[in-house]
Amino acid sequence: MQLTPDVFLIGGGSFGFDMSSPYDCHVYAIRSGQELALIDVGTGLDNDSIISNMRQDHLDPGAVSQIFVTHYHADHAGGLAAWRDLTGARVHASVGSTPAITSGDAKAIGLEAAQRGGFYPTDYEFRACPVDVELAGGEPLPLGELTITAHNSPGHCHGHAVYHLTGGDRSYLFSGDCIFHGGTIILQNIPDCSIPDYAETMERLSTLQFDALLPGHLSITLRNGKRHVDTAVNAFRSLGLPRQAIQL
Ligand SMILES: [Zn+2]
């Protein structure tokens, strides 16, 4: 589903538009010049649907050259190893999330807790994946004619990164599970979820300028996306908490 001249939505689950596995996050493709990049890849449970969605949009799955992952939770990163095998794409992840992705340790990626909570099938296994490019955060990288910059955004979990895409007809924030439509967030009862980190992250994001807010689940905003960050930052500043995006 083409969203803008540069960005396509090619997968997503039951907290989205049911385009692939019900467990998947939104999976985005960015087409820029000769480059084709993915932002998050879903669980890996239904790559066939993602591939067929790409073909419907006249995107060649084999041409994916770069993958950017927001965090190590299985709904976002579970398909990394399969996509890397399929395409040879270079996997980009934050320095903070790399150990968990490369080890695939079920506890470190929060899968153990999530399976206990009933979020994934009990037989689901996360395939560890090498990370080709570790991002410190703040370094602008060329992506065809566009520029993509990771920003560290811990809070939802350790090592979370959002991706700021600029240079096209509009600017974008791919926000993973950090900030959602309506200024909502996802706090979870897991050891690496942190309210103080979340509040600091939101202050940092409020300094970024962008038009479209493309989160990992739920509604998508193509203009005026910044207002959702403003809503969340105001809630934290008044010592409260933004609303939960998904009732757990
Ligand atoms: Zn998620």
Image (cartoon, rainbow, N blue to C red):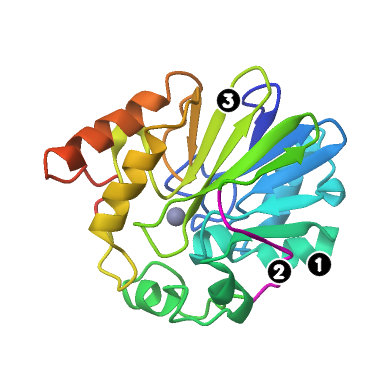
Chain part drawn in magenta: 128-137
Secondary element at image label 2: helix
Spatial separation of the CA atoms under disc 2 and disc 1 = 6 Å
* Residue under the image location 36 percent in, 57 percent down: 156
Amino acid type, residue under disc 3 in the picture: Ser
Q: Position of residue 204 (x, y in %)?
A: 38, 41
| Alpha-carbon span between mark 2 and mark 3 | 29 Å
Relative side of 2 to 176, left or right: right
Could you give the CA–CA distance between mark 3 and mark 1, rounded to whole angstroms?
30 Å
Look at the numbered disc 1 and say if its residue's Cβ is closer than 8 Å to ligand 1.
Answer: no
**Nearest to N terminus: mark 3 or mark 1:** 1
Q: Quadrant of residue 43?
A: bottom right
Ligand 1 is found in which quarter of the picture?
A: bottom left
| Picture layout, residue 113 above or below residue 48 | below
Judging by the rendered image, the residue that carries numbered circle 3 is: 171
Q: According to the image, label 1 marks what residue?
A: 85
Q: Quadrant of the C terminus?
A: bottom left
CB under 8 Å between discs 2 and 1: yes
Q: Nearer the viewer, mark 3 or mark 1?
A: 3
Q: Which mark is residue 81?
A: 2
